[in-house]
Every structure is written in structure tokens, then in C-alpha cells.
Image: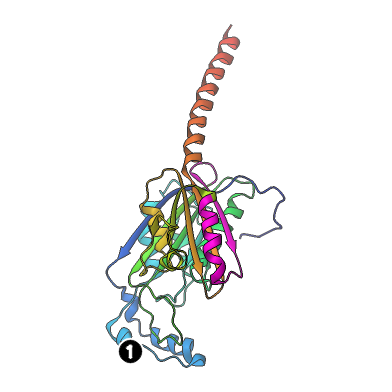
Amino acid sequence: MFVAGPPGTDPGPPARLRAAVARVFDETSATALDPALRPFLVDLVRQYGNALREDLLTTGAGHSFGEMAEALLPSITAPDEPVDLLVLVFAMHDLRLARSTAAYLSDLCPGTPVAFAVCDQGSAAAFTALRLTQSYLGSGSRGRALVFVVEQSALHYELTEPAPVPDRHTAVALKFESATGGPVAVRQHTGVDAKRVPGLFAEAARAAGGTVIASSRLAEAAPGVADVVAAPGQPYTGVWWELAQLPRDGVVLVADYEPALGYLCFSTVDYEKDAVDYQKDIVDSAADTVNHGADRSLVAG
């Protein structure tokens, strides 16, 4: 059993992005035809008065977060790479009921990691997950973490007010380690109204000095700042999808804005620092080999 304790005073080394993979799932999940889905959704929306989307329930539209994340596991980690932490990130409801999907994925993952989900924060949830991962890996013990950001396109009830709904089923998996990879930094601004967004975004882009990835919503609020703009049909996975497509080179700033909550979020990945550290490790390893050989020569003499 995992027992949490008070945070340490030493922040430790930064989490490092070791790998990123992404996939769009064209098919639907068999769980979309689960007869238990309708009563679950009825209970979910009853107090808000939302009408159910009978067309989606009849055709079996949608996908399971667990199935999508499970499909990415073999490409993001190996059986001999035990994982210490697994975080599942989502914004809309899942199709698979009566189970904790994060705990389910933990059972499939080497190392059976501590697992939990982050939700109810819109597009800011992934940045919160990264911040929590930073804290976990920087707590003093070197380890490995997986963050899955998932979205599916079937919202089975009518919205009471406009909100972004994905147009495809997408999953992105990010692997973080404390020893190797591009160092990651995360910053989340709260209580940010639309007027402050362009200035804060431009300032963060200048400070990063590299490739800037932004959601379509943020790019619209602050035109001309982003180098790469995520597809509007991927409101929750889009910026991480684009990160997974980029070469591991230079500095990358990932940025998104959640206007409903006033969260303006930034994350930088410094692949340049990863390259420098990699070269340093080679030099240090060579020096250790030479010193070890010298020590053995002295003993033999």
C-alpha cells in the first residue's frame, strides 16, 4: 500500500521527458453498446436537465479511455522498465463504467505503479498531471512515470452551454524519468482573464526561446505567437499530440488556455539540456573506466 507523507524541502532533479507517442483511434469501442451506459448517463445529467443523445447511444459511438491507453503501453514502456507512477488525464466521461481506469492500467503496467486520474480541469488537467509528476519524481528517489492524456468524441448528452468537444478519439502517452530525457518545467497561472492572455503568452514564448506549440483556442486569443497550432478537433490532447510529432531537438514550449477556469498553462521541454547531459554522461563514464583501470593496475603492482 502506498502511504503519502509530507513533502520534502529539497525539490530534487527535474522530471525529464524520455518518450512521447500518440495515436488516433478510428474504430469505436464495444463498451459504447453497454446497456448500463444509458442509466449511468441518466443519473449523470438528471439534475442538470440535459437531454440524452439517443443517436449516439443507438449507434454505439465513442471509445474507452482504458482501451486506448492500453494500446499505447507496449510502445511507451518495456516489460523490463518498471514504472513508479501512472496518471490518467481526461475531460469528458469515459464509456467503461464500474472500474477505476487508472488502477486497471496500473495492473497492466510493469511495476504496478501508484495510479490516479486528473480531471474536471479542462485542458489544464494535463499540466496539473505534469506538475504532480514533477513533484513525485523530484522527491528524492529516481523513478519513472507515465502520463496518459485521452479524449473521445462521443458526448452522449446535449450541452447546456458551448464547450469544446473532440472530433476524434485520441490518446497521447508521455514517459518521464528522473535520470535521462529533456528536463521539463511547468507553470500554471490562475485567474487569468482573456485580456491578460496575449501578454503572458508572448512573455513565456520569449523566455523559452524555442518552438512554441499552442492550442487553437490560445492561438486565436494571441495570434502570431505560436509556431505550431494544434487542431481544434483535439481540445484536450492537441498540444501533446503535436509535441509527440516534433523531433527531440532544442527547446519546446507547450501552452494552453482554459477560459472557463482562467488557467493559462505552460510547459517547457529542454532537449538541448538532454543532449548536454548525455555527452557529460559519456565523458564521466569514460573517466570512470580509466580511473577504475588505474586502480586495478595499482593493486596488481
Q: Which residues are magenta?
A: 178-206
Image quadrant in which the N terminus is located = bottom right
Residue 190 placement (x, y as % from top left): 61, 67
For label 1, the SS is: helix
* Up-down relation of residue 89 to residue 58 (above or below): above
Q: 31 and 57: which one is in front?
A: 57
Q: Is residue 270 visible?
A: yes
Residue 186 colored in magenta in the image:
yes
* Up-down relation of residue 278 to residue 126 (above or below): above
Q: 196 and 176: which one is in front?
A: 196
Residue at image x 52%, y 60%?
201
Q: Which of the 4 quarters of the picture holds residue 172?
A: bottom left
Q: 284 and 272: which one is in front?
A: 272
Residue 288 placement (x, y as % from top left): 55, 23
- Residue wearing tag 1: 54
Residue at image x 33%, y 89%?
54
Residue 55 placement (x, y as % from top left): 30, 87
Image quadrant in which the C terminus is located = top right
